Image (cartoon, rainbow, N blue to C red):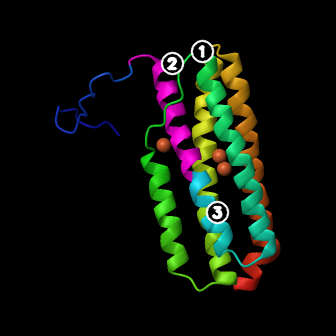
Amino acid sequence: MATKTTSKGKIQPKKGAADQLKDFMIDGIKDLYWAEKALVKNLPKMAKNATSPHLKTAVNDHLNETKVQVKRLEDAFKALKLKPQAVKCEAMNGLLKEAKEIMEETEPGAVRDAAIIAAAQKVEHYEIASYGTMATYAKLLGEKEVLKLLLETLKEEKTCDKDLTKLAKSEINVKAK
Ligand code: FE
Ligand code: FE
Ligand code: FE
């Protein structure tokens, strides 16, 4: 449906706002860099609060992958001849706040485990969306090295998401029920 365009509600760009797709991609990589580093700090909390040994292992394994993902983003900055810079990702900040909230709202055990999986999958989906979009830009821009790095991480995020689904269906959700 067509909407009436008025100046009201239009966002004024900040100083230094991106006017090229490449700059917008770089902004996205800075956002992901913040997000991955925040995950390195917060995933141990999720692992500690999990009861199922399988879930604990899954979260800890992904923590190790996440540490490598941080390095990969540093390599992407390098490929772009930039210094690594993290810019706060409000979405990841919100998802991690929500993760903490839902752990507080659940008793330790199977229900909290289900909650941890739910929170972790929201995180993975956000990462999949972000890496997917940035990879599409990198491809379009001919940034082959950046593309390779983003796709490696994207694959890990997708695998993690699938593994969490399997774990939820085969074990956690059933126990929580
Ligand atoms: Fe990640
Ligand atoms: Fe973000
Ligand atoms: Fe992830």
Which comes before the other along the chain, label 3 or label 1? 3
**Relative depth, front residue between 72 and 164:** 72
Q: Residue at x 57, y 48 (%)?
A: 126
What SS does tag 2 mark? helix
Q: Main secondary structure of the magenta part?
A: helix
What SS does tag 1 mark? loop
Q: Quadrant of the C terminus?
A: bottom right
The amino acid sitting under disc 2 is Lys
Q: Give percent across and percent down for residue 24.
A: 46, 25
| Residue underneath mark 2 | 22
| Residue underneath mark 3 | 44
Discs 2, 1 touching: Cβ within 8 Å: yes
Among the 4 quarters of the image, the one containing residue 130: top right
The amino acid sitting under disc 1 is Leu
- The mark closer to the camera, 3 or 1, is 3
| Residue underneath mark 1 | 141
Rounded to the nearest angstrom, the CA distance separating label 2 from label 1 is 7 Å
Among the 4 quarters of the image, the one containing residue 19: top left
Q: Residue at x 60, y 45 (%)?
A: 127
The amino acid sitting under disc 3 is Pro
**Relative depth, front residue between 116 and 4:** 116
Relative height, residue 78 to residue 85 (above, below): above
Q: Residue at x 47, y 29 (%)?
A: 27
Write down the region rendered in magenta.
19-38
Image check: 169 left or right of 113? right
Q: Give percent across and percent down for residue 51.
A: 72, 79
Which comes before the other along the chain, label 2 or label 1? 2
Q: Residue at x 69, y 74 (%)?
A: 50
Relative height, residue 128 to residue 93 (above, below): above
Within 10 Å of the Cα at label 1, are there few (<14), some (14-19), or many (20+) other Cα atoms?
Answer: some
Within 10 Å of the Cα at label 2, are there few (<14), some (14-19), or many (20+) other Cα atoms?
Answer: some
